[in-house]
Image (cartoon, rainbow, N blue to C red):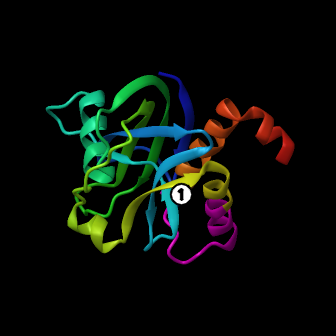
Amino acid sequence: MQLLKKMIHPDLASTEGRTFPRTTARGIILQGENILLMYTKHYNDYSFPGGGVDSKENLLEGLKRELMEETGAQNIQVLEPFGYIDEYRPHYKPEYDLVHMESYFYRCTASDEFLEPTLEDYEKNNGMQALWVNIFDALDHNRRVIENKEASMGFSILRETFVLEEIAKKYFPDKVNESA
């Protein structure tokens, strides 16, 4: 799969040390210019549905499970790999110096029928919800949050916004060129 970008958190002096490895799979589900994203009220941002792949799962199994849990999506079909982000960030647990996260993005489809999501408690507490949103509206929103350096802003918004930009360039090049 193609490396889209390597990201290193500005608080890290090095990518060496006691490293916690994390592998994630994230879905790109488009309907025209609308994209299925997770809006998180606590962070005031849009992100891709998906998350950590369990040790007993392969990437695609983890992707489908995460999409079903977070969005309630049914009949998920993986169309193609989109690319991955290689990311280093500080870890909050004292036994580790940093997290090395590889986030794999896949273009997917799902049926029009969605069941009730089964969010984890922290996701519910952060106000996460799956929404269909125009990709350019989501981009504008995330860019404003980044530009305003909102206090609630997490590092992941940089990854998510970068991938949204790459999707817009690939699937809506005429629209991207109009706004440039």
Residue placed furthest toward the front: 113
- Magenta stretch: residue 151 in it? yes
Instruction: Indicate the position of residue 26 as horizontal and vertical percent values.
Output: 40, 40
Q: Is residue 43 above or below residue 74?
A: below
Give x and y (percent) for residue 18.
29, 48
Instruction: Indicate the secondary structure of the residue bearing disc 1.
Output: helix
Q: Which residue appears farthest toward the bottom when viewing the image?
A: 151
Tell me which residue sits at (36%, 36%) in the image: 111
Residue at horizontal 52 percent and vertical 64 percent from the top: 45
Residue 141 placement: quadrant: bottom right
Residue 148 part of the magenta segment:
yes
| The magenta segment | 141-156
| 77 relative to 116 in the view: left or right | right
Residue drawn at (37%, 65%) of the image: 128
Where's the C terminus, which quadrant?
Answer: top right
In which quadrant of the rendered view does residue 133 lie? bottom right
Q: What residue is shown with label 1?
A: 157
Q: For the residue marked with disc 1, what is the amino acid?
A: Ile
* Quarter-of-image position of residue 125: bottom left
Residue 33 lies, in percent from the top left, at: 62, 43
The answer to whether 144 appears left or right of 66 in the picture is right
